Amino acid sequence: MESHEKVLLSIRQIIRAIDLRSKKLNKEFGLTSPQLLLMRTVQHSPKLTIRQLSKETNMSQATATSILDRLENRELIERQRDVVDKRKVHVLITTKGKTILNQAPKLLNEDFVNQFEDLESWEQTLIVSSLQRVSEMMNRSSVSDDTLSLNIDSKRSRQ
């Protein structure tokens, strides 16, 4: 197996573990990982706009809005128009949302969190920076593939 295939296999294993954790959170707690991630982000950085929130959590604005709709229907968050710029909408955690967050488990499996925290600081930094680098490389590649696809489609339409 080539190195890049080993990377793919590892990423797939990580994705699977995250998906299983999200399903377990949803079943036992009633919130998915993305919902919990958005709520925790709002809790730590109150008064973010939806655009800022989607950027902070690395979600598309449409995905974040859809998740926020569900959270708002459950009265866990509320939206508030900016008093100065009415185009901006801020997201706030409600009292009910704060109660839920205080009871919520960690986003990642407790065993993983404990093992990760037991690592030396340099080892944690190495893992985080390696994952960030992989993410940057994949996102850059994704943009290139999209650009390539757009260029091919553009050339076809001119013919």
Image: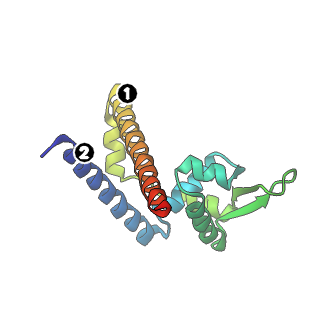
Above or below, 37 relative to 4? below
Residue 39: quadrant of the picture: bottom right
Q: Horizontally, is 127 left or right of 80 in the view?
A: left
Query: Splitting the image into 4 quarters, where does residue 86 fall?
Result: bottom right
Mark carried by residue 121: 1
Tags 1 and 2 touching, CB below 8 Å: no
* Side of 4 where 99 appears, left or right: right
Q: Which label sits on residue 103?
A: none
Closer-to-camera residue (100/153): 153
Q: Amino acid at mark 2?
A: Val
Q: Secondary structure at mark 2?
A: helix
Query: Residue drawn at (55%, 63%), measured in percent from left and top?
Result: 63
Residue sitting at the far left: 1
- Residue 92 at x, y = what percent? 70, 57
At label 1, counting other C-alpha atoms closer than 10 Å, the crowd grade (few under 14, some 14-19, many 20 or more) is few
What residue is shown at x 42% (from left), y 56% (from top)? 152
**Residue at horizontal 46 percent and vertical 50 percent from the top:** 147
What residue type is disc 1 on?
Answer: Ser
Of callouts 1 and 2, which one flags the residue occurring earlier in the amino acid sequence?
Answer: 2
- Name the residue rendered at 58%, 48% in the picture: 55
The image shows residue 104 at horizontal and vertical percentages of 50, 59
Residue 128 image offset from top left, x and y in percent? 39, 36
Please tell me which residue lies in front, 141 or 122: 141
Front disc: 1 or 2 = 2
- Comparing 95 with 51, the one in front is 51
Give above or below for 122 relative to 43: above
Question: Of helix, strand and loop, which one carries label 1?
Answer: helix
- Badge 2 density bin: few <14, some 14–19, many ≥20, Cα 10 Å: few
Q: Which residue is mark 2?
A: 7
Residue 7: % across, % down: 25, 45
Choose between 101 and 16: the one closer to the eye: 16
Query: Is residue 130 positioned above or below 109 on the image?
Result: above
